[in-house]
Amino acid sequence: MWLRKLLKFLWQGFERRSKEFLRNTSLQGLKYVWNKELPGWVQLYFVKVFIVAVYVAINLAVNVFHKWQSTPVIIGISPTVTAIQSIPFPAITVCSMNKAKSSIVSTFESGSLEHAMLQKACNQEFNYTRFRSFRPRLKRNSFANFIFNISHKCDEMMVSCKFGEQSLPCSDLFREIYVDEGLCCVFNFLHPYYIYKHSDSTLRDYTSSKGLSDIAVDWSPITGYPKYLPAGYYPRPGLGVGVYNGLQIVLNGLTDEYYCSSTNGQGFKVLLYNSIDQPRLKESGLPIMIGHETNYRIVPNSYEAVPSIRQIDPTTRQCIFSDEQKLLFYKYYTRRNCEAECDATYFLRLCDCIPYYLPLIYRNATVCHVAHFDCVNRAELGSADGESMECKELCLTGCHDVTYFPNAFSIPIIPFRQESVSSQGDFLKNFSTDYIVENLAIVNFYHADNYFRSHVRSSYTGLTEYMSLTGGIMSLMFGFSVVFLAELFYFIFLRSLFQYIQHCSLNRRDRVHMQYSDEH
């Protein structure tokens, strides 16, 4: 019985407060619903209008929420420009298409160990069954050392080098590096001490034996160069605009030494990338034709990210900060470095070794040699397995990154008279015009503009923007505001609580008064 009375009391109180709330609320239209002075059809009209407005507002707010969830990050253009002097000149790797010098490999006996390794270097089919038990005990018997011995060195391949207005020994600008195209020459690459976590027998020191090299410094897309820099350092920054502020190299194809080519012709491959990336020239290398002067106009592009997007899941924002995903071999995370480690893991899993040009992700891992070549060939020809694909799917783009897009054009080197040769530079004086056309290539790398604008990743809508959009919709459609929430909280909770406390206080006072009256 007492429960029924309590429910009746609560319902009457709720009905009374609801009518009072609707008469006094700040929401548009509701005050007309319980206004008894208005005709019934007017009250019904405002009820329908309010319901439609709430329905439309909720749908619009849900659409905003879905867009917030599906597009959490947008890429915009930075309002400020970046000078090319504040980023490194691109790292440049140059490879000869000739995989082996004829004067060296022509003496190899058929069926010998050297002949077997030569077939692999030239990507020729060969049966390595008889060498499956071979284990190189000395470094000079390794495949990487074999590649070094049969390939063109930088001092053989490069006739002249000029950076800016200064002609420099090519040995002070370029170093040998092992890539998927064999032994190549690299310029402006970060020193191994700064980019690799541990040493590798295939890594070569980048310090000039003559002591003429600039000092190696650290650099990354996030932190940039150190605050204090020596007078001469590398990675070298951009100097300015135009050919005379870029890098010019004259390459010697040594066509008489051709034994096998990585393509169907003669020439070179080149790749431009940032100084902390792993170069992959087989898929991305650009051709340099012998007998031509090739110009690469460099268009830099950098990506930045505002710190606020860190709270968004990496798979949702589709980029990774360097400190969010640690690599096994590289100190700096980039998508290319991550994919290189995935490839190394793929070969290690299938063939129990890692090719010489891939990162040695484990110190005790075996570098592939002739005993592994059958397996390595199958792994290279076969498509990557599911585990490798899953690994590469996790290699998202770095939130901070620098890329370089080369706009290339080339013109033939036209045979000219000897007096005309001297005007082209001292490096051509010692060559005949026929030799120049048949063996040499001139390459210029230079910036087209002094400044560029970065791309900035930022939140499409943060919490403030989302509340503003949603609040604007609710306010536009039916006058919703924070004051309405305060009104609702007051009428539903606070007022009921105070009335209940007041009711209990009156009952207690009445009982005390009745008890006092009975005693007297």
Image (cartoon, rainbow, N blue to C red):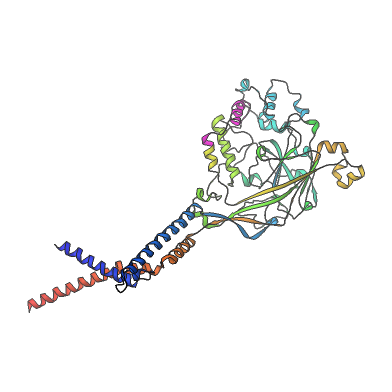
Q: Residue at x 37, y 62 (%)?
A: 51
| 500 to the left or right of 280 | left
Q: Main secondary structure of the magenta part?
A: helix
Res 79 visible? yes
| 8 to the left or right of 299 | left
Give the quarter of the image for residue 278.
Answer: top right
Q: Position of residue 460 (x, y in %)?
A: 52, 57
Region of the chain picked out in magenta, as a range: 367-388
Q: Residue at x 86, y 46 (%)?
A: 424
Q: Position of residue 348 (x, y in %)?
A: 56, 33
In the image, is residue 419 above or below residue 181?
A: below
Q: Quadrant of the C terminus?
A: bottom left
In the image, is residue 446 above or below residue 346?
A: below
> As rendered, which of 458 and 272 lies closer to the eye?
458
> As rendered, which of 445 and 91 lies closer to the eye?
445
Q: Position of residue 131 (x, y in %)?
A: 63, 22
Q: Quadrant of the N terminus?
A: bottom left
